[in-house]
Image: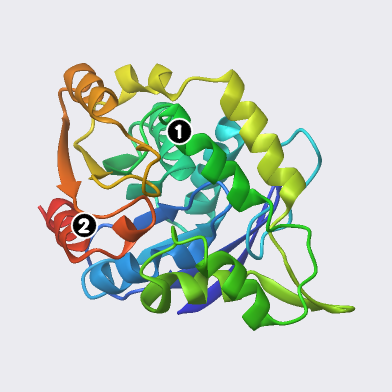
């Protein structure tokens, strides 16, 4: 796994690159407060056949946020296209999770000739209202100093949403920690994440649906985010998306919004779709 610093007009974008296969390059875009390591399991699945580039969106992981007011789905999508260009990638397959799926749809709308295939992991439009509080609660871990890495991991782990913990999410959360006076703090910027939350409240990702002409796979988590809550992609939203986007099909995976990122069925569906 190679760590890369990309100097874009918008700022510095950090990426992880792996894989030496000759298949179409795959670019991965993480969710609202996630980072490149959320795609570890997917990258391992694709690496033998595809070069894989996993991005830290600005304000996440190792990427600085940049100037206030410079974020939002469109700005992130412009970063995705610029990053691919800087890496010498003209056409690529695009995989986005959660908010990263919104950014990926925006990217496909801005550069349809460059996106060969599109994978949307549990994100095509506004989530069900019952899952919004847990999503926003996850943001509260940011801008806090923790006494140890173990304390931070325990806080996230006990929420119960981030699973499988040892197989994927523990490494993801450790990746974003840095040592500061008094302990450890996530590098991911709460201010940047909040800016994207506000942007999302004012924009509807369904506006991108008519632009999706390329083969598209929706990987839907068929378990609630947390017991007693709801779905990030509900059945009605899934059906509306499939009706509006003739080039799309859906794969149902027996996992929640986090678990879908490492579930064997999801890995198999994504690998098969991108290998066709």
Bin the neighbour count of mark 1 within 10 Å (Cα to Cα): few under 14, some 14-19, many 20 and up. Answer: some
Q: Earlier in the sequence, mark 2 or mark 1?
A: 1
Q: Are marks 2 and 1 in contact (CB under 8 Å)?
A: no
Residue 94 rendering spot, x and y as whole percentages: 35, 47
Q: How many marks?
A: 2
The tag on residue 130 is 1
Residue 21 rendering spot, x and y as whole percentages: 25, 72
**Residue furthest front in the image:** 228
Bin the neighbour count of mark 2 within 10 Å (Cα to Cα): few under 14, some 14-19, many 20 and up. Answer: many
**Displayed quadrant of residue 148:** bottom right
**Displayed quadrant of residue 110:** top left
**Displayed quadrant of residue 185:** bottom right
Q: Quadrant of the N terminus?
A: bottom left
Mark 2: which secondary structure? helix
Name which residue lies at 63% across and 82% down: 150
Give me the C-alpha separation between circle 2 and circle 1.
24 Å
Question: Viewer-proximal residue, 14 or 237?
Answer: 237
Q: Is residue 21 visible?
A: no
Looking at the rendered image, the disc whose residue lies closer to the viewer, 2 or 1, is 1
Residue 76 rendering spot, x and y as whole percentages: 57, 40
Per the image, the residue denoted by label 2 is 266
Apparent side of residue 261 relative to residue 36 in the rendered image (left or right) = left
Question: Viewer-proximal residue, 217 or 201?
Answer: 201
Question: Viewer-proximal residue, 59 or 19?
Answer: 59
Mark 1: which secondary structure? helix
Name which residue lies at 70% across and 36% down: 195
Name which residue lies at 71% across and 57% down: 142
User: In the rendered image of this protein, does residue 45 appear above or below residue 34?
Assistant: below
Apparent side of residue 44 relative to residue 88 in the rendered image (left or right) = left
């Amino acid at each position: 796994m190679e760590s890369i610093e990309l100097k874009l007009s918008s700022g510095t974008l950090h990426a992880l690159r792996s894989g030496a296969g000759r298949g179409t390059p795959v670019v991965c875009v993480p969710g609202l407060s996630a980072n490149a390591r959320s795609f570890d399991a997917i990258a391992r699945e694709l690496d033998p056949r595809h070069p894989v580039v996993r991005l830290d969106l600005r304000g996440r992981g190792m990427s600085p946020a940049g100037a206030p007011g410079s974020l939002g789905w469109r700005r992130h999508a412009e970063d995705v296209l610029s990053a691919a260009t800087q890496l010498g990638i003209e056409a690529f397959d695009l995989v986005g999770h959660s908010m990263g799926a919104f950014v990926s749809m925006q990217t496909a709308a801005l550069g349809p000739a460059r996106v060969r295939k599109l994978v949307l992991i549990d994100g095509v439009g506004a989530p069900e209202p019952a899952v919004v509080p847990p999503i926003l609660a996850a943001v509260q871990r940011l801008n806090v100093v923790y006494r140890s890495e173990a304390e931070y991991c325990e806080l996230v782990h006990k929420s119960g949403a981030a699973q499988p913990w040892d197989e994927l999410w523990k490494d993801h959360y450790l990746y974003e920690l840095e040592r500061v006076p008094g302990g450890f703090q996530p590098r991911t910027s709460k201010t940047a994440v909040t800016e994207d939350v506000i942007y999302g409240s004012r924009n509807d990702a369904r506006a991108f649906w008519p632009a999706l002409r390329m083969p598209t796979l929706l990987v839907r988590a068929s378990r609630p985010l947390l017991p007693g809550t709801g779905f990030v992609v509900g059945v009605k939203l899934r059906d509306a998306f499939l009706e509006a986007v003739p080039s799309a099909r859906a794969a149902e995976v027996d996992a929640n919004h986090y678990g879908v990122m490492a579930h064997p069925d999801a890995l198999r569906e994504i690998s098969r779709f991108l290998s066709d």
